[in-house]
Amino acid sequence: DAEITQSPRHKITETGRQVTLACHQTWNHNNMFWYRQDLGHGLRLIHYSYGVQDTNKGEVSDGYSVSRSNTEDLPLTLESAASSQTSVYFCASSGGSSGSSDEQYFGPGTRLTVT
Amino acid sequence: SQQGEEDPQALSIQEGENATMNCSYKTSINNLQWYRQNSGRGLVHLILIRSNEREKHSGRLRVTLDTSKKSSSLLITASRAADTASYFCATEGSNYKLTFGKGTLLTVNP
Protein backbone atom coordinates (compact mmCIF):
# COMPACT_ATOMS: atom_id res chain seq x y z
CA ASP A 1 0.00 0.00 0.00
CA ALA A 2 1.12 3.56 -0.69
CA GLU A 3 2.25 5.48 2.32
CA ILE A 4 4.13 8.51 3.60
CA THR A 5 6.87 7.96 6.15
CA GLN A 6 9.00 10.25 8.27
CA SER A 7 12.29 9.64 9.99
CA PRO A 8 13.45 9.85 12.64
CA ARG A 9 10.27 9.72 14.75
CA HIS A 10 12.04 11.35 17.68
CA LYS A 11 15.16 13.50 17.68
CA ILE A 12 17.03 15.39 20.35
CA THR A 13 19.67 17.83 19.18
CA GLU A 14 21.70 20.72 20.52
CA THR A 15 21.34 24.39 19.71
CA GLY A 16 23.34 25.36 16.63
CA ARG A 17 23.49 21.91 15.04
CA GLN A 18 22.19 21.21 11.55
CA VAL A 19 19.35 18.72 11.51
CA THR A 20 17.62 17.03 8.58
CA LEU A 21 14.22 15.42 8.84
CA ALA A 22 13.30 12.93 6.14
CA CYS A 23 9.97 12.54 4.38
CA HIS A 24 9.28 9.82 1.81
CA GLN A 25 6.02 9.12 0.01
CA THR A 26 5.09 6.30 -2.33
CA TRP A 27 1.83 7.86 -3.56
CA ASN A 28 3.67 9.37 -6.55
CA HIS A 29 2.17 12.71 -5.52
CA ASN A 30 3.41 15.92 -7.08
CA ASN A 31 2.77 18.08 -4.02
CA MET A 32 4.57 17.81 -0.70
CA PHE A 33 4.33 19.98 2.40
CA TRP A 34 6.08 20.45 5.73
CA TYR A 35 4.19 21.72 8.79
CA ARG A 36 5.05 22.27 12.40
CA GLN A 37 2.52 21.78 15.16
CA ASP A 38 2.76 23.66 18.44
CA LEU A 39 0.31 24.04 21.30
CA GLY A 40 -1.78 27.12 20.79
CA HIS A 41 -0.82 27.51 17.13
CA GLY A 42 -2.25 24.51 15.36
CA LEU A 43 -0.42 23.52 12.17
CA ARG A 44 1.70 26.08 10.37
CA LEU A 45 3.16 25.64 6.90
CA ILE A 46 6.95 25.75 6.67
CA HIS A 47 7.78 24.90 3.04
CA TYR A 48 6.05 23.21 0.17
CA SER A 49 6.80 21.81 -3.28
CA TYR A 50 4.62 21.29 -6.33
CA GLY A 51 7.11 19.07 -8.13
CA VAL A 52 10.75 18.17 -8.71
CA GLN A 53 13.06 21.18 -8.40
CA ASP A 54 10.16 23.34 -7.15
CA THR A 55 10.22 24.70 -3.58
CA ASN A 56 8.28 27.51 -1.94
CA LYS A 57 8.32 29.26 1.42
CA GLY A 58 5.39 28.94 3.76
CA GLU A 59 4.22 30.95 6.73
CA VAL A 60 7.13 30.09 9.06
CA SER A 61 10.09 29.34 6.77
CA ASP A 62 12.88 31.25 8.55
CA GLY A 63 15.64 28.87 9.66
CA TYR A 64 14.40 26.00 7.47
CA SER A 65 15.17 24.82 3.96
CA VAL A 66 13.98 22.04 1.64
CA SER A 67 15.09 20.54 -1.64
CA ARG A 68 13.16 18.35 -4.09
CA SER A 69 15.42 16.21 -6.23
CA ASN A 70 12.86 13.48 -6.92
CA THR A 71 9.13 12.90 -6.62
CA GLU A 72 9.27 10.74 -3.49
CA ASP A 73 11.35 12.81 -1.05
CA LEU A 74 11.25 16.26 0.53
CA PRO A 75 13.84 16.51 3.31
CA LEU A 76 13.55 19.42 5.74
CA THR A 77 16.78 20.94 7.03
CA LEU A 78 17.17 23.13 10.07
CA GLU A 79 20.30 25.09 9.26
CA SER A 80 21.22 25.94 12.86
CA ALA A 81 18.74 24.50 15.33
CA ALA A 82 17.23 26.86 17.88
CA SER A 83 15.14 26.11 20.98
CA SER A 84 12.20 27.84 19.28
CA GLN A 85 12.25 25.03 16.70
CA THR A 86 11.34 22.43 19.31
CA SER A 87 8.09 21.11 17.85
CA VAL A 88 6.33 18.23 16.16
CA TYR A 89 6.94 18.24 12.42
CA PHE A 90 4.52 16.73 9.90
CA CYS A 91 5.09 16.01 6.26
CA ALA A 92 2.13 15.70 3.90
CA SER A 93 1.54 15.02 0.23
CA SER A 94 -1.30 15.44 -2.22
CA GLY A 95 -1.96 14.61 -5.85
CA GLY A 96 -3.25 16.83 -8.60
CA SER A 97 -1.48 19.53 -10.57
CA SER A 98 0.33 22.43 -8.94
CA GLY A 99 -1.39 22.08 -5.59
CA SER A 100 -4.91 21.80 -6.94
CA SER A 101 -7.76 21.07 -4.58
CA ASP A 102 -7.09 17.68 -3.08
CA GLU A 103 -6.88 16.01 0.28
CA GLN A 104 -3.49 15.82 1.94
CA TYR A 105 -2.02 12.60 3.32
CA PHE A 106 0.02 13.07 6.46
CA GLY A 107 3.02 11.23 7.83
CA PRO A 108 3.20 10.12 11.49
CA GLY A 109 5.28 13.12 12.56
CA THR A 110 8.75 13.75 13.98
CA ARG A 111 9.07 15.07 17.51
CA LEU A 112 12.14 17.32 17.61
CA THR A 113 13.63 18.67 20.82
CA VAL A 114 16.37 21.29 20.68
CA THR A 115 18.30 21.61 23.96
CA SER B 1 -1.82 33.86 10.57
CA GLN B 2 -4.59 31.32 11.07
CA GLN B 3 -7.35 31.33 8.48
CA GLY B 4 -9.75 28.91 10.14
CA GLU B 5 -10.82 29.15 13.75
CA GLU B 6 -12.64 26.24 15.33
CA ASP B 7 -15.24 26.57 18.03
CA PRO B 8 -15.43 25.26 20.68
CA GLN B 9 -11.81 24.60 21.62
CA ALA B 10 -12.91 21.55 23.59
CA LEU B 11 -16.10 19.47 23.65
CA SER B 12 -17.03 16.59 25.95
CA ILE B 13 -20.09 14.43 25.23
CA GLN B 14 -21.51 11.01 26.01
CA GLU B 15 -21.39 8.11 23.59
CA GLY B 16 -24.40 8.14 21.29
CA GLU B 17 -24.80 11.92 21.35
CA ASN B 18 -24.14 14.17 18.39
CA ALA B 19 -21.09 16.45 18.26
CA THR B 20 -21.05 19.73 16.40
CA MET B 21 -17.93 21.74 15.71
CA ASN B 22 -17.77 25.06 13.94
CA CYS B 23 -15.15 26.76 11.83
CA SER B 24 -14.97 30.40 10.80
CA TYR B 25 -12.59 31.88 8.28
CA LYS B 26 -11.74 35.31 6.95
CA THR B 27 -11.00 35.30 3.22
CA SER B 28 -12.48 33.67 0.14
CA ILE B 29 -11.76 29.98 -0.32
CA ASN B 30 -11.72 27.30 -3.02
CA ASN B 31 -12.67 24.58 -0.58
CA LEU B 32 -12.74 23.72 3.10
CA GLN B 33 -11.53 20.43 4.53
CA TRP B 34 -11.90 18.70 7.88
CA TYR B 35 -9.20 16.51 9.38
CA ARG B 36 -9.01 14.32 12.48
CA GLN B 37 -5.91 13.78 14.61
CA ASN B 38 -5.69 11.07 17.22
CA SER B 39 -3.26 11.70 20.04
CA GLY B 40 0.34 11.28 18.88
CA ARG B 41 -0.62 10.61 15.27
CA GLY B 42 -0.70 12.43 11.96
CA LEU B 43 -3.81 14.06 10.56
CA VAL B 44 -6.36 12.06 8.62
CA HIS B 45 -8.58 13.64 5.98
CA LEU B 46 -12.31 13.34 6.69
CA ILE B 47 -14.19 15.38 4.11
CA LEU B 48 -13.78 18.16 1.56
CA ILE B 49 -16.49 20.64 0.64
CA ARG B 50 -16.05 22.99 -2.29
CA SER B 51 -17.02 26.66 -2.23
CA ASN B 52 -20.04 26.03 -4.50
CA GLU B 53 -21.40 23.29 -2.25
CA ARG B 54 -23.59 23.86 0.79
CA GLU B 55 -23.74 20.45 2.41
CA LYS B 56 -21.93 17.15 2.18
CA HIS B 57 -22.33 13.80 3.91
CA SER B 58 -19.93 10.94 4.53
CA GLY B 59 -21.12 8.14 6.78
CA ARG B 60 -21.84 9.68 10.19
CA LEU B 61 -20.33 13.00 9.14
CA ARG B 62 -22.26 15.99 7.86
CA VAL B 63 -20.51 19.16 6.79
CA THR B 64 -22.15 22.44 5.92
CA LEU B 65 -20.59 25.50 4.35
CA ASP B 66 -21.99 29.04 4.37
CA THR B 67 -19.73 31.21 2.25
CA SER B 68 -21.79 34.34 2.99
CA LYS B 69 -21.01 33.92 6.70
CA LYS B 70 -17.57 32.42 6.05
CA SER B 71 -18.35 29.49 8.30
CA SER B 72 -18.59 25.72 8.27
CA SER B 73 -19.82 23.12 10.68
CA LEU B 74 -18.95 19.47 11.18
CA LEU B 75 -21.60 17.23 12.71
CA ILE B 76 -20.72 13.76 13.94
CA THR B 77 -23.84 11.76 14.65
CA ALA B 78 -24.18 8.88 17.13
CA SER B 79 -20.68 9.47 18.46
CA ARG B 80 -18.46 6.63 19.67
CA ALA B 81 -15.54 6.53 22.08
CA ALA B 82 -13.29 5.97 19.04
CA ASP B 83 -14.29 9.43 17.76
CA THR B 84 -12.25 10.97 20.58
CA ALA B 85 -9.66 13.10 18.78
CA SER B 86 -8.80 16.63 17.73
CA TYR B 87 -10.64 17.95 14.70
CA PHE B 88 -9.21 20.62 12.43
CA CYS B 89 -10.71 22.65 9.65
CA ALA B 90 -8.42 23.73 6.84
CA THR B 91 -9.18 26.27 4.15
CA GLU B 92 -7.71 26.28 0.68
CA GLY B 93 -7.54 29.73 -0.88
CA SER B 94 -6.54 31.00 -4.28
CA ASN B 95 -2.91 30.01 -3.65
CA TYR B 96 -3.88 26.32 -3.27
CA LYS B 97 -2.25 26.00 0.13
CA LEU B 98 -4.09 24.72 3.18
CA THR B 99 -4.34 26.90 6.25
CA PHE B 100 -5.33 25.07 9.43
CA GLY B 101 -7.20 26.23 12.48
CA LYS B 102 -6.13 25.39 16.02
CA GLY B 103 -8.58 22.53 16.36
CA THR B 104 -11.38 21.26 18.58
CA LEU B 105 -10.57 18.54 21.09
CA LEU B 106 -13.53 16.14 21.19
CA THR B 107 -13.85 13.70 24.06
CA VAL B 108 -16.54 11.03 23.82
CA ASN B 109 -17.19 9.37 27.16
CA PRO B 110 -18.30 5.71 27.18
Image (tube, rainbow, N blue to C red):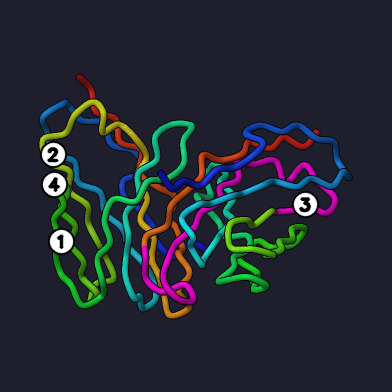
Disc on res. B59:
4
The amino acid type, in three-letter code, at marker 4 is: Gly
Separation (CA) of disc 3 from disc 2: 43 Å
Q: Chain of mark 4?
A: B
Are discs 3 and 2 both within one chain? no
Closer to the camera: disc 2 or disc 1? 1
Residue A99 on the magenta segment: yes
Separation (CA) of disc 1 from disc 4: 10 Å
Q: In the picture, residue A94 is in which quadrant?
A: bottom left
Q: Chain of mark 1?
A: B
From which residue to which does the magenta span run?
A76-102
Disc on res. B56:
1
Q: Residues within 10 Å of mark 4 (few under 14, many from 20)?
A: few
Q: Residues within 10 Å of mark 2 (few under 14, many from 20)?
A: some
- Relative to A54, is A104 above or below? above
The secondary structure type at the circle numbered 1 is: strand
